[in-house]
Image (cartoon, rainbow, N blue to C red):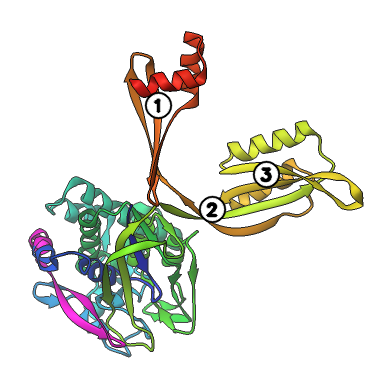
Amino acid sequence: MKTLYLDCGMGAAGDMLTAALTELLPDSDLFFNKLNKILSVLDVEVKKEKAVKCGITGTHAVVLVGGTEEGEEHHHEGHHHEGHGHGHEDHEHYHEGHGHSHEDHEDHHEEHTHSHGHIHRGMHEIEHLISHLDLPEKVREDVLRVYALIAEAESHAHGVPVSEIHFHEVGTMDAIADITAVCLLMKELAPDQVVISPVHVGSGQVKCAHGILPVPAPATAYILKEVPIYGGSISGELCTPTGAALLKYFGSRFGDMPVMKVQAVGYGMGKKDFPRANCVRAMLGESGGEEERMLELSCNVDDMTAEEMGFAMEQLLESGAREVYTIAAGMKKSRPGTVIHVICTEQDREKMLGLLFRHTTTLGVRETVMQRYVLERKIETLHTSLGEVRRKSSSGYGVSRVKYEYEDLARIARERGISLEEARRLAEEE
């Protein structure tokens, strides 16, 4: 399947993702021309620049509003916030990217407008701007959903309703351009899955006009809930709210790079220099099938009845466990017992643990982390003289298989008084 892998070892920002993804296209100039035609109604232009980080050549995306790089006065060292690692979105960090209530907006309007040139826009204003862009309906929907993720995070961080949130930096034209560009690029590239590495968020604190905030900033931390993130020795905010929202929205899963045949590699550069290459790396290629990080939870019991064991397995499967099975085992004191194995996703860990402790007599559960590789699968319904028959197809890793749904074959066998094998043969002949 067509797989896009994003290496976020130096975090992510909208401009970096834009630049990295454009390098995967056969003709990036054609894309920038198309993008700029769309953004022209907002007097916005996106330019690409060659950039080199630690000897690696890549692309830096620059947004011009009215011919001027928006917020470029904020790129200089020593402006209110230090240690940020990215390009024109650096200025997104100062306020966590960030929303205030209407009251805050009124109180600080003069300070922000005259001192920093900041624009405050609510979701209504954002939706109005996006409605003027000549975008495919799916892309427009993606842009608004990414903004909805940010609005929800701002609402949670500031304790005010979404309707009262006013964006600062993520409401400026360059952020709108970045989000629109990435959504368009995802449509152009059309990957079947987007796998994203654990996200480096940076460390320390960030100084802003309203005080000192921890890294990751509250809105970014909220967006990245249930996403594997980490800090490190680099001081500063490496993942912006815009970058976090784009990763969360488009990511199929987060984890290690899958086994894949890479066909194109892109580097999206940040503006500042660090001992490590300040970039997002994007790889596009083919993987043989779906790979998924799974957990195996297991426990030993020797004092449960068969009915209790069956009920526990039923509850685990109904609650989302991928597999539940048991193995007979010899326990301490020579007692016959059972080992219960539960295969589940990382997201379902706590739920599965709760069910194991509630429905079994175990006092402890072991965990093993594993990779699960599966074939790409689809189910189609065939309309035949035998009635509707569902057929499951799977492919990948150089193999392909077809299997008819058991319940449909069993129905045919009962209706015609034949064996399952004969029912399968009839279905194949249709």
Q: CA distance from mark 1 to mark 3?
A: 33 Å
Contact flag, marks 1 and 3 (Cβ < 8 Å) = no
Image position, residue 319 (x, y; %): 58, 40
The residue depicted at 35 percent of the width and 26 percent of the height is: 381
**Residue beneath disc 3:** 355
Q: CA distance from mark 2 to mark 3?
A: 14 Å
Q: Earlier in the sequence, mark 1 or mark 3?
A: 3
**Residue beneath disc 2:** 347
Q: Please give left or right for residue 329 compared with residue 182 in the image.
A: right
Image position, residue 193 (x, y; %): 35, 54
Q: CA distance from mark 2 to mark 1?
A: 30 Å
Is residue 51 rendered magenta in the image?
Answer: yes
Image position, residue 119 (x, y; %): 23, 68
Image position, residue 123 (x, y; %): 28, 55
Quadrant in the rendering for residue 272: bottom left
Dot 3: within a 10 Å radius of its alpha carbon, few (fewer than 14), some, or many (20 or more) residues? some
Secondary structure beneath dot 2 equals: helix
Amino acid type, residue under disc 2 in the picture: Gln
Quadrant in the rendering for residue 246: bottom left
Contact flag, marks 2 and 3 (Cβ < 8 Å) = no
Which of 418 and 220 lies nearest the eye of the viewer? 418
Q: Please give left or right for residue 51 compared with residue 291 in the image.
A: left
Which of 24 and 134 lies nearest the eye of the viewer? 24
Q: Is residue 179 visible?
A: yes
In this view, 312 is above or below 192:
above
In this view, 252 is above or below 174:
above
Dot 2: within a 10 Å radius of its alpha carbon, few (fewer than 14), some, or many (20 or more) residues? few
**Residue beneath disc 1:** 390
The residue depicted at 37 percent of the width and 24 percent of the height is: 428
Secondary structure beneath dot 3 equals: helix
